[in-house]
Amino acid sequence: MLRRKARRAQGDEHGDPLDADQERRVRAVLALAGVPQADLLDGVQQVRLRLLERAASGQEAPRDVSAWAAVVASHLAMDWHRAKRRQERLGERLASMRPPEHASGSGEDSRVLSVAVARGLDELPDAQRQILVLRFYADLPVRGIAEELGIPEGTVKSRLHTAVRALRARLHEDEVV
């Protein structure tokens, strides 16, 4: 009995930091928090990763791995909802920022473009997406972005150029523009 409890506190015998019961609990927490079925496995993997990172950094294992994993899962669910809301707001903002010459198009065209741009932004590396948002949505000049991020202006320009080119290619690929 003690061995089973010790093994459960450290995961299963195959080196997985979460045993089957703990994984089911994590899935349940995520599902009850409104995370779609398709994203549940990613959530479980995130919990595993955080547990492994904790061990790798030398921190002791949580006293109750199951409870710890449930708390982490609830935080992941909140992050998922925040990201979803952020994506929706970005789409709305993109739609409202459309130039007047495109205003004669239908509302459906505007939504399609907004969704395509949002998806294209999602596919960009974090550094490029950050530069695009700071430049075009926060309306910061290159110098301001460089100062804000603590990187050279040339790096800002390079990332901006690469990101715009990748986003433009994605929009053409999707036949949106």
Image (spheres, rainbow, N blue to C red):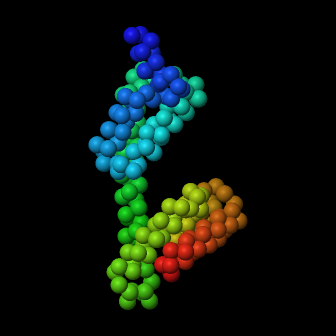
- On the rendered structure, is 43 left or right of 132? left
Quadrant location, the N terminus: top left
Side of 56 where 12 appears, left or right: left
Residue 67's spot in the image, x, y percent? 36, 28
x and y percent of residue 95 in the render? 39, 75
Residue 123: x percent and y percent?
54, 61
Q: Quadrant of residue 146?
A: bottom right
Q: Nearer the viewer, residue 19 or 71?
A: 19
Residue 109 against residue 101 in the figure, above or below: above
Residue at 43% from the left image edge and 39% from the top image edge: 44
Q: Looking at this view, is 46 or 23 the one in front?
A: 23
Given the current orientation, which residue lies at the most extreme left position?
32
Q: Is residue 22 above or below residue 92?
A: above
- Residue at 46%, 71% (x, y): give it: 116
The answer to whether residue 23 is visible is yes
Q: Residue at x 52, y 71 (%)?
A: 136
Give the vertical position of 98 relative to 8 (above or below). Answer: below
Residue at the image point whose x is 37% and y is 45% from the top: 77
Residue 68 visible here: no
Residue 58: percent from left, percent from top:
58, 25
